[in-house]
């Protein structure tokens, strides 16, 4: 029945695919938390969450703080609590990814991840964090309350499928409109001349994309316009147009996955795009045994509904009623995001409600034409001038060494590397936690050094730490010498600092960050 074009479309397999991919993205997100949450927001992290929670308590109180930034960690906070919550999230995500999920489990995942987002400060300030909470919220109502089987007897509510399409519409349109109103190089068709070189964390294929013929790069910009400003209007159309629109959006996201390291953003954006495809498409793609199970569940649901209908009842009514309540809520909460999207002063990646249920999105409204990187360096020499032997701290994702090819990171996220990409375009005053990092590096703090690919001072802490600003650009593939990058020193981003620097210690003490080793 799934492949009959003369029948109304069904979405049993669509739900199956949405939940499986969402489980995968959740698993990645919680794995990132397990590995990075302590050095970033732990009690001895760069931006300790306990200080953040304390400041909110002092300013507006714990009750108001909870309603402004809902999080399970208002009930209790410790490093152990953070790790336990992250591990629970990972385990539940794997259960969903394996094919088992219900509304209770999906609700738990949603609130658990939102709890990290709301105390994560700078590290969880990216658009895909609130996009994951919004996607996760909708997924709650795609499932029965209790039944965890991959193909429960209750069909996915069509209203929720439409809400997923509404989500992908806003994601793509927001990204397209911010480019339309932003940098002129998008309208000129030249944005991709620079994007692959200056994007946050390049991937293994980024340089290949960068040196494609200019005509190909201009065509890529036009494909961007089609995917972000044209295709979204067709996600609500009848079957053929909707399938084509969904395919364009998915192919666009796959292209972004191949050409860079944009965390789990593109994988996450594919999820609501899957709602464009009904079971007629999935039945031609998925293994026969999966399709058979879905067909069997669908037939049983139809038969059960028929029997109950004879008695004037409906076993699927609770899910339908709930889905319409959710639709009304999403409709009301969409007013501000839509107004923002239509505004000439459009802002990107912002939430308008405490639960991040309906947000505004956008990416790369402007594209830098030059790439700048901040490189931390340390020396054990008594001299802090350029004549000393300065050792570089190598990032896990950002380029430092000129002969090192970028590695594939995504869908995993390096929170620290991403923030340092932004920091290179600003001053240390905009990123005060970098001084906290310097203090930790001066003491060879293990948690801080693990944020980098390696520790150049295994035999003892450095005497001085500084940060140097460099301009980076791709070496041509035919230039020889094994170089992947070229660079030019711009100047000091942070001057050399030592453990006995009174100004450094006074600043850290004022922030509550001073730790005596």
Image: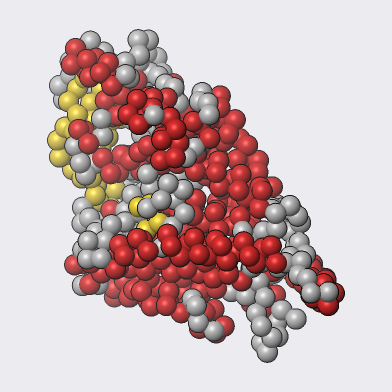
- Tell me residue 282's x, y (percent): 66, 73
Image coords of residue 413 (percent x, y): 45, 44
Q: Residue furthest front?
A: 312
Which quadrant of the view contains residue 173?
Answer: bottom left
Identity of the residue drawn at 66% across and 53% down: 103
- From the viewer's perspective, is residue 310 above or below residue 422? below
320 sits to left or right of 238? right
Residue 202 is left or right of residue 409, and the answer is left
Q: Nearer the viewer, residue 298 or 362?
A: 298
Does 299 appear above or below 115? below
Question: How many marks do you count on the picture?
Answer: 0
Coloring scheme of the render? secondary structure
Q: Quadrant where the N terminus lies?
A: bottom right
Residue at 54% across, 78% down: 243
Residue drawn at 25 percent across, 18 percent down? 510
Q: Is residue 283 above or below residue 34?
A: below
For the point 43% across and 74% down, the residue is: 232
Return the x and y of residue 78 as percentages of the image width and height: 51, 23
- Quick check: 368 left or right of 4? left
Looking at the image, which is closer to me, 346 or 36? 346
Quadrant for residue 372, please give it.
Answer: top left
* Residue 474 appears in the figure: yes
- Residue 367 vs residue 336: left or right? left
Residue 331 lies in quadrant: bottom left
Q: Position of residue 130 (x, y in %)?
A: 44, 50
The C terminus: image quadrant: top left
Q: Is residue 372 above or below residue 21?
A: above
- The answer to whether residue 478 is visible is no
């Amino acid at each position: 029945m799934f492949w009959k074009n003369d029948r109304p479309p069904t979405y049993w397999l669509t739900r199956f695919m949405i939940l499986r991919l969402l489980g995968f993205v959740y698993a990645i997100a919680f794995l990132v938390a397990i590995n990075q949450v302590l050095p970033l927001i732990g009690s001895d992290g760069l931006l300790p969450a306990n200080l953040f929670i304390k400041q909110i308590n002092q300013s507006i109180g714990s009750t108001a703080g909870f309603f402004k930034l809902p999080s399970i960690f208002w009930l209790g906070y410790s490093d152990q609590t953070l790790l336990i919550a992250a591990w629970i999230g990972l385990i539940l995500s794997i259960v969903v990814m394996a094919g088992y999920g219900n509304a209770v489990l999906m609700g738990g995942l949603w609130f658990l991840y939102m709890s990290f987002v709301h105390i994560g400060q700078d590290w969880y300030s990216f658009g895909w964090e609130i996009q994951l909470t919004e996607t996760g919220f909708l997924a709650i109502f795609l499932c029965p309350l209790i039944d965890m089987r991959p193909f429960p007897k209750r069909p996915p509510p069509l209203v929720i499928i439409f809400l997923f399409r509404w989500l992908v519409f806003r994601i793509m349109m927001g990204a397209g409109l911010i480019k339309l109103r932003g940098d002129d190089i998008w309208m000129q068709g030249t944005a991709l001349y620079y994007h692959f070189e200056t994007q946050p964390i390049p991937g293994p294929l980024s340089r290949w994309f960068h040196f494609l013929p200019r005509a190909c790069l201009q065509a890529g910009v036009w494909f961007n316009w089609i995917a972000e400003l044209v295709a979204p209007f067709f996600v609500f159309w009848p079957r053929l147009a909707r399938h084509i629109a969904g395919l364009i959006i998915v192919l666009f996201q796959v292209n972004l996955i191949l050409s860079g390291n944009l965390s789990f953003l593109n994988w996450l954006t594919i999820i609501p795009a899957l709602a464009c495809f009904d079971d007629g498409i999935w039945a031609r793609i998925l293994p026969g045994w999966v399709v058979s199970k879905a067909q069997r569940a669908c037939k049983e649901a139809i038969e059960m509904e028929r029997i109950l209908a004879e008695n004037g009842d409906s076993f699927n009514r609770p899910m339908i009623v709930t889905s319409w309540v959710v639709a009304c809520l999403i409709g009301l909460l969409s007013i501000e995001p839509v107004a923002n999207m239509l505004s000439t002063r459009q802002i990107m990646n912002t939430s308008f409600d405490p639960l991040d249920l309906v947000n505004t999105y956008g990416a790369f409204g402007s594209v830098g034409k030059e790439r700048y990187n901040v490189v931390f360096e340390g020396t054990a020499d008594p001299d802090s001038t350029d004549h000393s032997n300065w050792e570089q701290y190598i990032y896990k994702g950002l380029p430092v060494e000129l002969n090192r090819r970028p590695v594939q990171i995504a869908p995993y996220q390096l929170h620290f590397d991403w923030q340092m990409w932004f920091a290179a375009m600003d001053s240390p005053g905009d990123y005060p936690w970098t001084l906290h990092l310097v203090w930790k590096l001066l003491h060879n703090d293990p948690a801080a050094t693990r944020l980098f690919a390696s520790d150049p001072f295994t035999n003892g802490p450095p005497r001085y730490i500084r940060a140097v600003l460099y301009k980076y650009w791709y070496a041509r593939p035919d230039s020889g010498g094994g170089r992947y990058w070229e660079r030019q020193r711009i100047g000091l981003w942070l001057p050399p600092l030592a453990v006995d620097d009174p100004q450094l210690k006074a600043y850290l003490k004022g922030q509550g960050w001073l730790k005596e080793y």
